[in-house]
Image (cartoon, coloured by chain):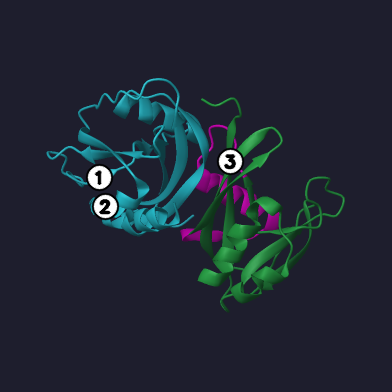
Chain colours: A cyan, B green
Amino acid sequence: MGKTPWGLTVRAVIFDGQGRCLLVRRSKQNKSFGGMWEWPGGKVDSGEDFAAALHREVAEETGLAVELAGLACSAGYDLPKIKVALLCLEARLVGSDEVKLSDEHDAFEWVSPIDIPRYEYMPGVTPMMLEYAKKR
Amino acid sequence: MGKTPWGLTVRAVIFDGQGRCLLVRRSKQNKSFGGMWEWPGGKVDSGEDFAAALHREVAEETGLAVELAGLACSAGYDLPKIKVALLCLEARLVGSDEVKLSDEHDAFEWVSPIDIPRYEYMPGVTPMMLEYAKKR
C-alpha cells in the first residue's frame, strides 16, 4: 500500500422530473470549501457498503429518498492527509422532491446540466463537473 | 434503495517501467466471460475497504505488490442479478514484475495503452477501455 491512505467518497446526481439535478452549497462557515457547490453525498464509512452510504448521506443532507440508476462520473484527487476516489451515481427521486437541508449546507438549486459550469466547485472535482455537463 | 442491489468492483491499471499496463485473460473454462481480457481486480467484499480489496485481488491474481497512484477510469454496467460500479485505479509496481497467475486467468500481457483496443473485453467495460486507451 502507498504511504497515503485512500478514501472512497460517493455522490448522487439526483434528477427531478424536469431533467434538473440537485446542487447543494457547503455552509459558508465550513472551513473546508465553504460556499462551494456539490452533489449530495460524502465519505463511505469504514466497513460500509457504498450504495448504503450514498442513501444515508442523501437522506441526511437533503431528506430525499432516491433510487440509484447508473454511474455518472468519477474523479481522483488529493486532500492533505488522504487520496480520494470519488464515484458519482445518477439517481431518481422516490417520492417527495422537498429538500430539507442539514447544517452542512445552506442553499440548494435544481440545475439543468447545461448550467452546471455556472457554479463553483472544489478544485479537485471541477474538471469532472464540467466534463459531465458537456456529456449530458 | 432500488430493487437491484449494487456491487463495487475495483481494478488496477498496473504500469511497468516501460509505460505498459498489465492485462490478464479470464480462463477459457470460466463460464462468465472466459477468454476475455481485463485489468487485475475484482469485487470488494462486504465490509472491506476498496483499496485493501484491490491490493488483495492484485496479489491473489498476479502475485504483484503495487502502490495505488490515482484514478484511471470508471464504468457502470448491469449483470443478471446486480448492478456494478467499477472503479479502476492506476498503480505502480513495488518490487518484482514477475507475474504469477492464479487459476482464474490463463495468460497475461504487458500492453502499451495504444494497443488496448486490440484485445477483447466484457461488453460492459469495452467503451471504458477504448476511452482510456485514447486518453493515455
Residue closer to the observer: B126 or A123: B126
- Range covered by the magenta-colored residues: B43-71
- In this rendering, the label closer to the viewer, 1 or 3: 1
Q: Can residue B44 be found in the magenta stretch?
A: yes
Residue B60 shows up from this direction: no
- Tag 3 residue: B44
Q: Which mark is residue B105?
A: none
Question: Residue B133: image x %, image y %?
Answer: 58, 69
Q: Chain of mark 2?
A: A
Q: CA distance from mark 2 to mark 3?
A: 28 Å
Above or below, A107 relative to B77: above
Q: Which mark is residue A37?
A: 1
Question: Residue B78: image x %, image y %?
Answer: 65, 41
- Amino acid carrying label 2: it is Met
Q: Can residue B76 be found in the magenta stretch?
A: no
Asked if the residue at tag 3 contacts the one at tag 1, i.e. Cβ–Cβ closer than 8 Å, the answer is no
Above or below, A16 relative to B111: above
Q: Specify the farthest residue to the right.
A: B29
Residue closer to the observer: A115 or B54: A115
Above or below, B120 relative to A53: below
- In this rendering, the label closer to the viewer, 1 or 2: 1
- Tag 2 residue: A122
- Amino acid carrying label 3: it is Val
Residue closer to the observer: B116 or A18: A18
SS class, disc 3: loop
- In this rendering, the label closer to the viewer, 2 or 3: 2
Q: Specify the farthest residue to the bottom.
A: B18
